[in-house]
Image (tube, rainbow, N blue to C red):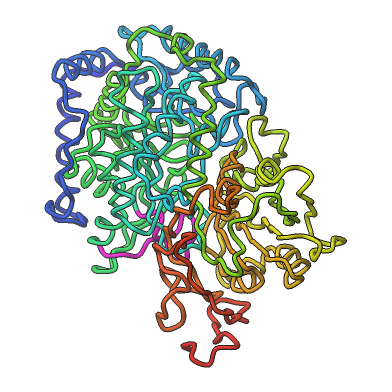
Amino acid sequence: MPARTGVSSLDMQACRIRFALFALLVAMAGWPARAADWPRIDSAIRRDEALEARVRGIVAGMTLAQKVGQMTQAGIQAASPDDVRRYFLGAVLNGGGSWPDGAKHAAPADWVALADRYYEASLATGLAVPIPVLWGTDAVHGHGNVHGATLFPHNIGLGAARDPALIERIAASTARAVRATGIDWVFAPAVPVAQDLRWGRSYESWSQDPALVREYAARYTRGLQGRFADDANAIATVKHFIGDGGTTGGQDQGVTRAPLDELIEVHGAGYFGALAAGAQTVMVSYSSWVDTATGIDHGRMHGNAALLAGALKQQVGFDGFIVSDWNAIGQLPGCSNARCAAAVNAGIDLFMVPEDWKAFIANTIAQVLAGEIAHARIDDAVTRIVRVKLRAGLFDGRKPSLNRYAGRIDALQDRTLAREAVRESLVLLKNERSALPLAPGAKLLVVGKSADNIANQAGGWSLTWHGTGNSNADFPHADSILAGIRAVAGEANVTFSADGTGVDAARYDAVIAVIGETPYAETSGDLPAPGTVRHTDRYPEDLAALQAVAEKGPPVITVLVSGRPLYVNDLLNLSDAFVVAWLPGTEGKGVSDVLFAAAGGRPVRDFRGRLPFAWPGVACPGPRASGPNGAPPLFPRGYGLRYAKGATVPRLPLDPARRCGLVQPPTGSASWPSE
């Protein structure tokens, strides 16, 4: 157990002076921005002087060991409730694929029981004023780690919906689900403005439009947090500060090269919206920043004092706390996962060190005593953490199981809302030969690997980190896209063949091909050069399935399940209608809702989605899906057809490029620009 280390008032005064000098040096040396560059944000959660007095009293009564414990976040797989008690841990988390007792199908009651044990342990530390522990989770499209929870479309699909009110309702639903499992802190919203869709986290980006991202971030924060006046409210985390969606080549954890004004105006938009709405925590990005206007390499964000302590806290005025990402401090020069004075001094307040938390506590205490970290910096961090916990109502004396949603399976499910979100997110790129809507009673052939695969339609961050290792049985309150088609058309009218072979497509009135990407998350989902963004390069089975049924007589309707726009000219040419379903989550019936007509032949529902990102027409697109020499993308951002407003898509040229960096003009188009 760490020693309880006291600090004299003279030592504390000296530390405060040193920290003030440090802040002044940050402002004078290496400061990348003028004060006017960063907008001052007035938070919807106002400063409360009575609460501030409580914070000061609590922090003043703490030892150094207790303070550093509060700054530490451990994984539930590596820290027991007794560890929370012994080491004064301020927070725990369950990472993607981390569940109570390692049980993937743990029930809501199991989650709540563990939350109660952590909470009770945090009140038994011997602190003069016990400080309840926070539990954080990645609930990025619903409560994705929990068996049986409704999963909404990923952010990119919600961006296509262009419905801010819908975003707020989804956030509120997610907060209820999280509180039903005893958890009070959500690592969302993610607000990247992705620039290169080779990035494997592109589906976590709402749009290339910073204005939409800013509005969505505000509405999501309001829906999730409210004013902490209801049992359904949870703490929001806006992430990842800053520029994670702008890395060169879409490389995860890479380098964002941009002038300061672009960093602020484009990549900062979501933060300004979320912080104005009252977001209480900010998570730092793994990425680095090079200011192209000055040529200065500012290094990893986790060590960037000018942007964290300077811009975010001082200039923007953020008074919540900053949390590191998973073991990200270990990437800083001279640091490890268990030791990093540079990150503490840069302004990070809470440290996500899931396995190495015990060594981190010991090392940080030693660094403070050695003068590498000022006591005042520790006080600032703990003040912010305690402030947020007070604002969020954690000191109200109620353990998690006393929340009115605790353990309620119905609070984990919001299927009607999720189905609505799927309908709104669908984008129609092509509709010829009157392929859609499908007539009632039509005989349908359904093909494609993703037609009856809920894991594929849910994508990453679904039960497991990357969304892999799951089957339909792991999603008990869900429908595949095939199930939705059968429900509308009737079982007897639908034949399914995953690869389309061995079936005579000519015998059917229409063919529906449901194809697309398989699940991935950060890094594993990247498409690094020299690879292309051609879908068929990675999934040739999808092209084969379409070739097996195309041009046999009946129209072919392709439904693409994908976390990003991709080069699909070959697939578009084989399709009479083409629907982008993004990653719709657990409500596959939302897709079939829009594909069919009523008895009179009129569509039951129309397509409403519009592209949140431009769509590439070449295998090696430039920024924002541009073609060679800056040629326009195949479909611009905002494109999306309606039943009443169609457009002809001519037969598209096929780009033969197999390696990016060696782009060749596509065949069949003499007018196509060349490099």
* Residue 87 percent location from the top left of the image: 45, 18
The residue drawn where x is 37% and y is 46% is 163
Quadrant of residue 320 within the rendered picture = top left
Is residue 365 something that shows in the picture?
no
Would you place residue 395 above or below residue 496 in this image? above
* Residue 214 percent location from the top left of the image: 29, 48
Is residue 314 something that shows in the picture?
yes
Q: Is residue 248 magenta?
A: yes
In the drawing, does residue 470 fall left or right of residue 253? Answer: right
Spot the residue most to the bottom.
Answer: 670
The residue drawn where x is 62% and y is 38% is 464
Considering depth in this image, is 123 or 512 the residue closer to the camera?
512
The residue drawn where x is 34% and y is 28% is 225
Considering depth in this image, is 301 or 10 the residue closer to the camera?
301
For the record, the magenta segment spans 243-259
* Residue 267 percent location from the top left of the image: 32, 55
In the drawing, does residue 583 fall left or right of residue 34? Answer: right
